[in-house]
Every structure is written in structure tokens, then in C-alpha cells.
Amino acid sequence: MTPTHFTISSAFLLGMMGLAFHRTHLLSALLCLEAMMLALFIALSLWSLQLDATGCSTAPMLMLAFSACEASAGLALLVATARTHGTDHMQALNLLQC
């Protein structure tokens, strides 16, 4: 495994572990998801550069656009949750309490 692959894999796994173990606030969960998406973007970009394929060069930009849409939707949910519940703690978010 090259150092580049190790760095990208460890960044993705750190984001996944942060999402799994530190779920106290909604904002921290969204940041972990964004870190995972950025690691995937870098991996996909480097993969298309290594293959010298021009057909695969649009995939990282498309993924980055979807990641930006996901981040904006997550922040909109964060604002809506903070307004309705008064906090962004994950313990306060219960789907049975509408």
C-alpha cells in the first residue's frame, strides 16, 4: 500500500469512526460525513489521474457537486432542528416525538 492510499484510507476511516463514536451533536456528525466525502473525492481524483482517462475526469467534479448539495441540505436540517428543538444534541432528536 502506497503512502497516498494509506493517507486517504485513514482519513476516510477516521471520518467513519468519528461518525460512529462521537455522535453528541448533529454538527459533528455532518462534519464527519463531509470529511468522508472529501476523502472519497481525493481518492477518485487521484485514481482518474493515475489512469490518464479523460472519461473519468468528470466523475470527481460530479461527486464534489453532490457533496456540496449534501452539505447544504445538512446545514438546512441543522438550522431547522435548532429552531424547533432548541439544540442540536442527537439525544433530543427522537422521531417518535413530533
Image (spheres, rainbow, N blue to C red):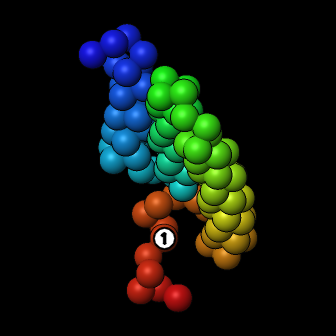
Q: Is residue 19 visible?
A: yes
For the point 33% across and 12% down, the residue is: 2
Q: Which amino acid lies under the numbered mark 1 shown in the image of this protein?
A: Leu
- Residue that extends furthest to the left in the rendered view of this protein: 1
CA neighbours of label 1 inside 10 A, class few (<14), some (14 to 19), many (20+): some
Q: Which residue is mark 1?
A: 93
Q: Is residue 3 above or below residue 19?
A: above
| Residue 65 percent location from the top left of the image | 69, 52
Instruction: Name above or below for residue 11 compared with residue 76.
Output: above
Q: Quadrant of residue 73?
A: bottom right
Numbered disc 1: secondary structure: loop
Q: Does any portion of residue 46 appear in the rendered image?
A: no
Please tell me which residue is depicted at 61% across the width and 37% down the height of the picture. Answer: 54
Is 22 located above or below residue 49 in the figure?
A: below
The reply, left or right, for residue 30 in relation to residue 69 is left
Please give left or right for residue 18 compared with residue 38 in the image.
left
Quarter holding the N terminus is: top left
The residue depicted at 41 percent of the width and 86 percent of the height is 96
Q: Position of residue 48 (x, y in %)?
A: 52, 33
Task: Estimate the x, y position of residue 59 in percent, counting from the top left.
Answer: 58, 47
Q: Nearer the viewer, residue 94 or 60?
A: 60
Choose between 50 and 7: the one closer to the eye: 50
Q: Quadrant of residue 71?
A: bottom right
The furthest residue to the top: 3
Residue at 48 percent of width and 70 percent of height: 93
Q: Is residue 40 above or below residue 20?
A: above
